[in-house]
Amino acid sequence: MTRADLARIIFEKVGLPKKEAQDIIEVIIENIKNTLAEGESVKITGFGTFNVRKKTPRRGRNPQTGEDMEITARRVISFKPSNILKSDVEQKK
């Protein structure tokens, strides 16, 4: 599913013009990105939670050369689906 698909669904279900639907999607995504960039969690009830985790530096190996190297510390985004989402996906088998 793409942003255009989401805009089309909003257009069909709510009746907003496609341009407004696209603008709404952009605002929502931009707010989620900014919140995560600030290190805060984003919880969407019935869908799941996006968290920012800090990973510490660690030793690794370059798979092409086999050379040892240090993997730098970084922040990563993780997603934990809600129980509602899990059960909905499970039922749609």
Image (tube, rainbow, N blue to C red):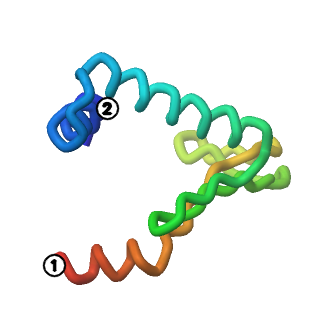
Tell me which corner region of the image, top left, top right, bottom left or bottom right, holds residue 15.
top left
The N terminus sits in image quarter = top left
Residue under numbered circle 1: 93
Residue, x 41% and y 31% (percent of image)?
A: 25
Q: Which mark is residue 27?
A: none
Residue 60 in the image: state x and y as whole percent.
72, 52
Residue, x 28% and y 74% (percent of image)?
A: 89
Residue 6 in the image: state x and y as whole percent.
27, 38
Tell me which corner region of the image, top left, top right, bottom left or bottom right, holds residue 9.
top left
Residue 3 in the image: state x and y as whole percent.
31, 32
2 or 1: tag closer to the N-terminus: 2
Residue type pointed to by label 1: Lys
Residue 81 horizontal side relative to residue 66, left or right? left
Q: Nearer the viewer, residue 47 or 1?
A: 47
Residue type pointed to by label 2: Arg
Alpha-carbon span between mark 2 and mark 1: 25 Å
The C terminus sits in image quarter = bottom left
Residue 54 horizontal side relative to residue 31, left or right? right
Say which element carries label 1.
Answer: loop
